[in-house]
Image (spheres, rainbow, N blue to C red):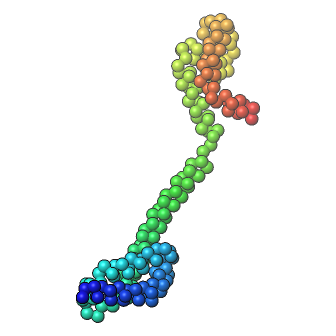
Amino acid sequence: MHDINHTQDLKKLNRIIRKYEKPLIHFAFSYTGDFEASEDYVLESFMEYWTNRDSLTNQANSNILAFILTVVKHKCLNHLRQRKYQESISDNIRDLYQWELDLQINSLSSCEPNELFKTEITAIVEDTLSKLPSDTRKIFIMSRDENKTRKEIAEIMNMSVKGVEYHISRALVELRTNLKDYLFYILLTIYN
């Protein structure tokens, strides 16, 4: 008896599949826009009916097609919810990328290479001068910042002009060494 019912159920399912498979796939596709997913959802719905057929046939007024269509509908709803979730994540990533790009554009727009180099060069000069021996630093500052001649500096420091030249030369060697990465920029600035 069980085999007869099983065979009848299988024949009934095959008739439903032949008659409704394509319209159900079309129905699912009209919502998902994904043909393969629509085919899968319809096939899974038929399988779900087959798995639950004993409990469904015992219910009064059970409608197989209504059950299958309801399952397809829920699978399509889950598909759409998943797509909406993925798109919201994509939107968030796009917004974050746009924000980062705007930040980079604004940062680069406000960047003045000349000011950056001037600041860095000034810091290196000040650091180099602060590390020089006291007399060398004083002599170099008098020569460059105060525009004093070597003879004037020699009189102030109570030393020979050769001694002043030695201290200036020593300061220039230190500065040249510490500013070696900026020499091209310095030369470019001088000639412009």
Q: At which x and y percent is residue 10?
A: 35, 85
Front residue of 92 and 7: 7
Front residue of 17 and 179: 17
* Vertical position of residue 80 compared to residue 101: above or below: below
Q: At which x and y percent is residue 157?
A: 60, 10
Question: In this image, 25 relative to 187: left or right?
Answer: left
Q: At which x and y percent is residue 59?
A: 25, 90
Front residue of 167 and 10: 10
Front residue of 110 and 71: 71
Q: Please tell me in which quadrant of the rendered image residue 114 appears.
A: top right
Rendered residue at 64%/30% (across/down): 182
Rendered residue at 30%/85% (across/down): 6
Question: In this image, 185 relative to 69: left or right?
Answer: right
**Residue 77 appears in the picture as rendered:** no
* Vertical position of residue 115 compared to residue 39: above or below: above
**Residue 149 appears in the picture as rendered:** yes
Q: Please tell me in which quadrant of the rendered image residue 19 appears.
A: bottom left
Badge count: 0
In the rendered image, the residue lying farthest to the bottom is 61
Q: Quadrant of the N terminus?
A: bottom left
Question: In this image, 161 relative to 36: left or right?
Answer: right
Rendered residue at 45%/66% (across/down): 86
Q: At which x and y percent is residue 141?
A: 61, 20
Q: Please tell me in which quadrant of the rendered image residue 174 appears.
A: top right
* Vertical position of residue 132 compared to residue 7: above or below: above
Q: Quadrant of the C terminus?
A: top right
Rendered residue at 56%/30% (across/down): 123
